[in-house]
Image (tube, helix red, strand yellow):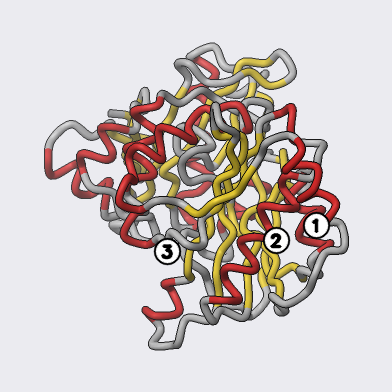
Amino acid sequence: MTTHSSITAIQPKSPAEFERFLSVPDGIHFEPDTLAESKANEHWLLEDATGARARCSLWWHATPNYQGDRVGLIGHYAAPDTLAEAVLRLACDRLRLAGCALAVGPMDGSTYHRYRLVTESSDEPTFLLEPHNPASWPAHFTDNGFAAMAQYYSAVQDDLDAEDPRVPVIEQLMEAEGVRLRPLVNTEFERELRYIYPVVAAGFAQSLLASPISEDEFVAMYSQLQVLIDPQLVQIAETDERAVGFLLVLPDWRQHQRGEAIDTVIAKTMAVLPEYSQQGLGILLCARAQEAASNLGYSRAIHALMHEDNYSRRLSAHFHGHIIRRYTLYMKPLEGTA
């Protein structure tokens, strides 16, 4: 426990302390088991005399390097404006003492989990699996010495009947190479996840701050989505020997929660083996998913959480997607942190 002025910082140990950690206002709710499975090196809960609470978790073991610097991650972040400086100062001090040269956040342990902050938004409502946060949180980071590390976008495509003239040529090329596309088989969901795991692992290996994930971890994570998936929307590209591409598309169940008819699908995750990445397979996966969505009666698609330099971003622009949200991941050098 540490105390500074009217602020008390503790590492939760008792059930009551963890309950206060989990119930910090504006923070994403976690079950205790989920928190334990996050493998964070430390959890911190800050409280002041008014009863305000803030929290964060820190990771520094087995985190990725960035340009040769050892990275520490700040995640499970939640704080009122009055405690933002204190919780981020504590986080940076702890990461520096652990030997990290760069603090990155918010990121809940890896890019396979929740990360980034919404920094700019249209009136488009939040969609399924989209991160959300109070509007003041980006300033928590920028006012305390953090700068943008990466920018991300989500865009809406309003016309699913738009055709890409490149698709017929790509179809012929893929056919000549023995590549065919099919929807996911929902009755074999775990087998399908294990089948596409090598594609996802290879496809994301070069992504910013990529860290490895085991096959079992991947299966456990994506199995939670089974009840949300319409298998006809999910596209798998394969040869006789293996899967070579994957596109995860889901209905936007947030519309149903708002009492609306679901007319929108979300293109969430695309992965293609590196040897197929320059052959247009991503274009073909998108076109087939778009066709399936249109045939099922959907009229719009959200291209979700694309990195500013990502191939998916260029695909979205080609399909006339217009930006509805921007997100930022932040970093701060830790040299000289007090």
Within 10 Å of disc 1 (Cα), the crowding (few <14, some 14-19, many 20+) is some
- Whether residue 86 is visible here, answered yes or no, is yes
CA separation, marks 1 and 2? 7 Å
Q: Are marks 1 and 2 in contact (CB under 8 Å)?
A: yes
Q: Is residue 297 left or right of residue 227?
A: right
- Looking at the rendered image, the quarter that the N terminus falls into is top left
Q: Secondary structure at mark 3?
A: loop
User: CA gap, disc 3 to disc 2?
Assistant: 17 Å
The x, y position of residue 259, in whole percent, is 38, 88
What amino acid type is highlighted by mark number 3? Answer: Asp
Who's the residue at 51% across and 39% down the image?
107
- In the displayed structure, does residue 96 sit left or right of residue 187? right
What percent of the width, then of the height, locates residue 49?
Answer: 30, 53
The CA distance from mark 1 to mark 3 is 24 Å
Give the amino acid at mark 2. Ala
Give x and y (percent) for residue 137: 56, 56
Q: Residue at coordinates 74% horizontally, 27% vertically from top-left?
A: 275
In the displayed structure, 163 sits above or below 98; it is: below
Residue 287 is marked as: 2
Q: Residue at x 78, y 74 (%)?
A: 162
In this view, 268 is above or below 332:
below
Residue ID for mark 1: 167
Picture quarter containing residue 315?
A: bottom right
Q: Position of residue 272 (x, y in %)?
A: 66, 37
Q: Mark 1 or mark 3: which comes first in sequence?
A: 1
Q: Which residue is mark 3?
A: 230
Number of other residues with Cα within 10 Å of mark 3, as a class: few under 14, some 14 to 19, many 20 or more: some
Residue 132 in view here: no
